[in-house]
Image (spheres, grey):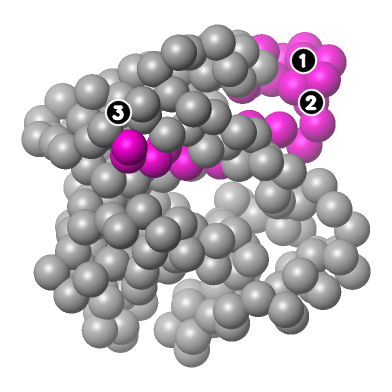
């Protein structure tokens, strides 16, 4: 694993799990290398293990429409696009045109890139323009807005649709939250845990991944 990837387990365990999981293809590997070589904040990128997990979730849900909040350099979007059928669609939202351009360049090297629709602008504003239903949503954006994103997404999801929210253990700081971001993630976790509209589980994958299935 890359030295600055976010994970709660030891690098050796992470590497072992990756070695025993579905490998990433050459386009994803090239995207990952460019991100870690040239892009500030590269540790925000979803790693290969979580990417394989996202692709499998898309397939297990039988998703045809996916929405993502937080494109960054496009690794997670391409992983999920690989799990979609040929006529599937993934809408991904971000505010950074520079990282969005890196993403688009790599997506164009993949036969699955044509499934991805890129939207630039504040995600909460983009969500207001989208029509559901979506089968799966992946949230990996600014943590202070997680609760607002969740409430905006839930009406757009089909019954049985799956929300996947990243970084919900926040490097363990949710155990004793102090900063505004710590408190926002802890508040979001408590909100989802008490929400009867969804079935939920918080997994210790990478930096914490919450799965919430709409009842």
* Mark 2 vs 1: CB contact within 8 A: yes
Classify residue 121 by image quadrant: top left
Query: Badge 1 local density, few (<14 within 10 Å), some, or many (20+)?
Result: some
Residue 124 screen position, x and y as percent: 27, 26
Q: Which of marks 3 and 2 is in front?
A: 3
Classify residue 61 by image quadrant: bottom left
Which residue is painted at 21% across and 30% down in the image?
Answer: 156
- In-image side of 11 versus 188 (left or right): right
- In-image side of 117 versus 144 (left or right): left
Q: Is residue 74 above or below residue 28?
A: above
Question: Quick one: quadrant of the N terminus?
Answer: bottom right
Residue 160 screen position, x and y as percent: 33, 37
Q: Give the range drawn in magenta.
A: 160-185
Residue receiving disc 1: 177
- Using the numbered discs, state the Cα–Cα distance from disc 2 to disc 1 in whole angstroms: 5 Å
**Residue placed most toward the observer, 159 or 47:** 159
Residue receiving disc 3: 153
Judging from the image, what secondary structure is the residue with disc 3 in? helix
Q: Is residue 175 among the parts visible in the rendering?
A: yes
Residue 140 screen position, x and y as percent: 48, 41
Magenta residue check for 171: yes
Q: In this view, does 65 lie above or below 133?
A: below
Residue receiving disc 2: 173
Residue 3 screen position, x and y as percent: 80, 64
Q: Which of marks 3 and 1 is nearer the N terminus?
A: 3
Q: Earlier in the sequence, mark 3 or mark 2?
A: 3
Which residue is painted at 25% across and 84% down in the image?
Answer: 111
* Mark 3 vs 1: CB contact within 8 A: no
- Using the numbered discs, state the Cα–Cα distance from disc 3 to disc 1 in whole angstroms: 25 Å
Classify residue 196 by image quadrant: top left
Which residue is painted at 49% across and 85% down in the image?
Answer: 25
């Amino acid at each position: 694993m890359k030295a600055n990837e976010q994970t709660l387990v030891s690098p050796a365990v992470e590497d072992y799990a990756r070695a025993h999981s579905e490998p990433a293809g050459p386009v994803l590997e090239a995207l990952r290398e460019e991100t870690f070589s040239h892009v500030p904040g590269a540790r925000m990128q979803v790693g290969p293990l979580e990417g394989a997990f996202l692709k499998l979730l898309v397939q297990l849900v039988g998703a045809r429409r996916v929405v993502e909040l937080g494109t960054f350099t496009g690794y997670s979007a391409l992983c999920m696009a690989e799990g979609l059928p040929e006529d599937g669609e993934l809408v991904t939202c971000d505010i950074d045109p520079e990282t969005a351009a890196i993403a688009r360049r790599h997506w164009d090297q993949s036969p699955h890139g044509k499934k991805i629709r890129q939207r630039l602008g504040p995600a909460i504003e983009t969500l207001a323009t989208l029509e559901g239903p979506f089968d799966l949503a992946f949230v990996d954006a600014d943590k202070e807005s997680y609760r607002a994103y969740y409430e905006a997404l839930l009406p757009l999801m089909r019954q049985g649709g799956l929300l996947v929210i990243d970084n919900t253990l926040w490097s363990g700081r949710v155990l004793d939250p102090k900063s505004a971001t710590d408190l926002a993630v802890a508040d979001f976790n408590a909100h989802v845990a008490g929400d009867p509209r969804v079935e939920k589980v918080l997994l210790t994958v990478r930096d914490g991944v919450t799965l919430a299935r709409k009842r």
